[in-house]
Amino acid sequence: MALTLPAAAQEAVHGGPVRALALSGGALASAGFDQSMIVWDQEAGRARAVVRWHAGAVNALAALPGGGFASAGEDGRIALWPAAPGSRPDRVLEGHTEPVAALALSPDGAWLASASWDGTARLWPLAGGEARVLEGHRGNVNAVAFRRDGVVTTAGFDGTIRLWPANEAPTVLAEFGLPLNALAALPDGTLAAGDVDGMLRLVAPDGVVREVRAGARPVVALAAPADGAVLAAGSLGGAVTLWDAATLRLRHMLDGPGLPVWSVAFSADGRSLWTGGADRRVRRWDVATGRPVGPIGGDSADEVPAGADPQGARVWRACAACHALTAEGGNRAGPHLHGIFGRRMGSVAGYEYSDRLARGDIVWTRETVAELFTRGPDEMTPGTKMPVQRVGNPEDLHALLDFLEAATR
């Protein structure tokens, strides 16, 4: 489904973490865990269209020739959209059997590459025809990028960076022993990789490695402008850092919301950086100064009820990206929580639950919600779409329950 918004109603915000960003033909697109893609007017800060078509989180975006976008995600499908998206994509690419984690457009605009958790990457001819399947990684393929010479590069859970020349055997350029989450190609053929240990590693075409610690948490997003002078790295710790690519000197640490940052993208002229993350916002930064220009879209913050427990409100921040407190706030990446206490799980109208929660064999009480955050959703409700979230501090858990009781009545 696609919704094109009238001018008076173009205040939009994602209903879950922003997982991917891309710029194409002067437009900016964002996509996220709420299963939607939003196409933005960059300068006005308003949405041109909100597209909900994928059956699951949208993990990846790429620019297409002519100003369109490619989107892909949890459902394993890749959708090709025109610059003004309609109710359905122009074309759907199918073949992956697990979620697609990343997309990249070739320098000549003729090929789209995809990386998937099914252990393969694929090279799709945009003019039509069969995809080339790239097999060799052991486990999830998390990232894909094209070098300027058109060679496809991939990185994955097995800690390797692999090269896939068109008419030659694939090679392993580097191996680090820890999962790699993100990949970016620089104009000179150097590849930047983001590691699960918080390291930013640059691998030259001859295999020589330079590295710097970008933070204490995994680096999950990387981007470079067309000139390759700067590298932006986003981490699960909430930090966004800008590095001089030639010297690996830190230029700026962006003062963001302190929540996981899943996506980064430079404007065409390299002067602006766009970021997206767990606070559901798309934010713009001045690259030269590292200062915020401002978020786009509507207000993403739920109004905290008067008298609500402040400690509980602080703990709630980790949940606010995916859940609204009121029915009026609507369903986001997760269902709204209005009236949760005494409600049977899997019962909010209009929300597409995972099979486990749809069975509805648990009633939410203080005790069962406490159990959810103590054991974790992966253990209490296996197969749920809810991210693993535990509250280990008993005082924090008690405060969160007090907050929810007051805020969801």
Image: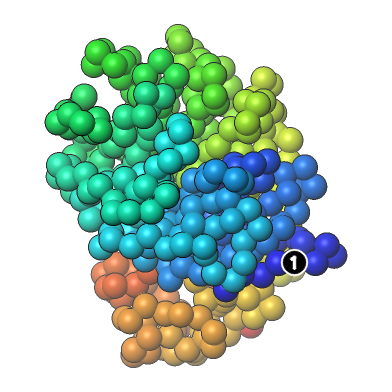
The image shows residue 409 at horizontal and vertical percentages of: 63, 83
Q: Quadrant of residue 57?
A: bottom left
Query: Does 79 appear above or below 224?
Result: below
The reply to whether residue 326 is visible in this rendering is no
Please state which of residues 80 and 110 is positioned toward the viewer in this rendering. 110
Tell me the colour scheme of the image: rainbow
- Residue occupying the point 59% across, 56% down: 82
The image shows residue 237 at horizontal and vertical percentages of: 45, 40
The reply to whether residue 284 is visible in this rendering is yes
Number of marks in the image? Answer: 1
State the quadrant of the N terminus: bottom right
**Residue type pointed to by label 1:** Leu
- Residue occupying the point 27% across, 73% down: 382
The image shows residue 159 at horizontal and vertical percentages of: 21, 35
Residue 196 located left or right of residue 290: left
Give the labeled residue for mark 1. Answer: 5
Q: Quadrant of residue 292?
A: top right
The image shows residue 253 at horizontal and vertical percentages of: 56, 26
- Residue occupying the point 47% across, 16% down: 245
- Residue occupying the point 76% across, 61% down: 11
Query: Does 103 appear above or below 317?
Result: above
Q: Quadrant of residue 188?
A: top left
For the residue carrying disc 1, how many other residues have a C-alpha within 10 Å: few (<14), some (14-19), or many (20+)? some
Query: Does 224 appear above or below 251?
Result: below
Query: Does 134 appear above or below 303?
Result: above
Residue 360 located left or right of residue 321: left
* SS state under label 1: loop
Residue at the farthest right position: 8
Please state which of residues 153 and 183 is positioned toward the viewer in this rendering. 153
Residue at the farthest top position: 247
